[in-house]
Image: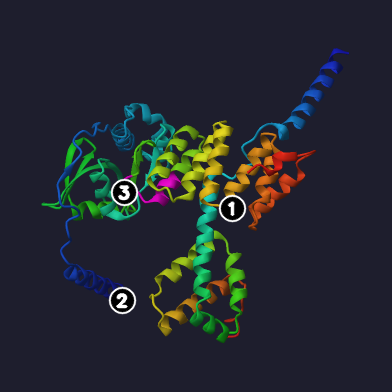
Amino acid sequence: MSRQRNVLGVWLLLTAGCALFQPPPEPLGSAPLELTATPFFPQQDYLCGPAALATVLGASGRDIHPDDLIGALYIPERQGSLQVELMAAARRHGRLAIELPGGLPAIVDQLEAGRPVLVLQNLAIDLWPVWHYAVVIGYRPESDQFLLRSGRERRKVMGRNRFAATWERAGRWALLVLDPDAAPLGVPPRAYLQAAADLENVGAYQPALRAFRSAASAWPEEVMAGLGVANNLYYLGRHEAAMAAYRRLLASHPGHDVAVHNLAMLLLEAGRPCEAQALMRRVDAEGPLLDTARRAVARAPIDDCGGAATRP
Amino acid sequence: MIARLQRTVLQLVVICLALAAPLAPTHASIVGTDAAIAMSERAEAVARVNAMLMREDVRGQLEAFGVDPHEAMDRVNSLTNAELAQLQSQLGELPAGGDVLGVLGVVLVVLLVLELLGVTNVFTGV
């Protein structure tokens, strides 16, 4: 017992010490930001999930009322919504659901780009959590305060430290809901591309294609952006366009294993084994995917490729 | 008679469906972007660890422990993604730079992870 008390005492001393030596925080931006056009849906009962999601969907150009999201989001026994379901619902509405890494500065970066950010907060303590979804719509550097659409409050003002504490107790979860046609300003490529791939995974090929195109124009050097464009063209049944996209990717990244493999498979599927053969002949790299492609091409029935095999 | 005919037709339908299933156009033949991202991230992670293992000082230290650096690289290649992530995060916590402590740290972390996974037994005798 007394030992426990000692431990607690030491802990308090240490944390107090930490607090004393903490430098005053730098403001997170220079100009005050407030996205006043962000829609507001006063929350009813425990429905902060649907209200917050409808807010960011609306800001991304998809007008929807929280009532229309309740069925997809609200779990009565839990009196709330799960993060994964918020993301899934955003995808169902053709939007990218991007988990933002990078802490508070990343949120302020998005505000600067004109995009509100959905956050999860724990308004109580770790042992007895009170979860709450809200939407960050502004930041005031002069007073170091965040502005939120939260619950029934259209414009809740929270000091940065208090906001950061509630947000950190909820695992620093920040969700950006983005129109796939919008430029990915301030979003790390990796997080953006993963969100686009998630759209593809759930069969939303049209939005996924648009997202990968936005990524390709923002980061032309990203192989995965070009690959995503080609793959989703294929999934949409636009085979000629997909082939052209794989070939473009191979022009800048010769021998890229996934692009070679997918193009070879597509050529075989389209009944053009000679072109597949010619493609494989030009690749001398090794790897499991390339081996798979070589075997598939070797198995394809080829009578006479003639001049077609030498086609560039 | 009719019942028998029905049964034959049903059997034919089942056989046709079974034959048609593999011929139907599927999306399974291409590698999706999600899988491609996972593969490239893995390749990057393996390359980062291997580049560390091939550093002159780290190689020397590995050899001092009686571990062939090339064998260690082979083993890094066969780690699962989760194990690789664990190794990476532990390596990431080490101080950067070419000091002796840093080198020893890298070698110990790599050996410890490989040891825990049962691929080496450097520490078993200790």
Q: Does the magenta portion include A188? A: yes
Q: Does the magenta portion include A289? A: no
Q: Chain of mark 1?
A: A
- Between circles 2 and 1, the one closer to the viewer is 1
User: Where residue A247 appears, x then y in whole percent?
Assistant: 56, 43
Instruction: Identify which amino acid the numbered label 3 is placed on.
Output: Gly
Horizontal relation, residue A52 to residue B25: left or right: left
Name the one closer to the observer, B117 or B91.
B91
Q: Secondary structure at mark 2?
A: helix
Residue beneath the point at 20% across and 54% down? A28
**Residue carrying label 1:** A255
Q: Going by the picture, which residue comes out furthest to the right? A: B1
Horizontal relation, residue A77 to residue A148: left or right: right
Q: Going by the picture, which residue comes out furthest to the top? A: B2
Residue beneath the point at 79% across and 22% down? B10
Q: Residues within 10 Å of mark 1 (few under 14, many from 20)?
A: many
Residue beneath the point at 33% across and 37% down? A49
Magenta segment: A185-195
Image quarter of the N terminus of chain A: bottom left
**Numbered badge on residue A3:** 2
* Mark found first going from the N terminus, 1 or 3: 3
- Between circles 2 and 3, the one closer to the viewer is 3
Q: CA distance from mark 2 to mark 3?
A: 49 Å
Quadrant housing residue A41: top left
Q: CA distance from mark 2 to mark 1?
A: 65 Å
Q: Secondary structure at mark 3?
A: loop
Work out whether A134 lies above or below A28. Answer: above
**Residue carrying label 3:** A186
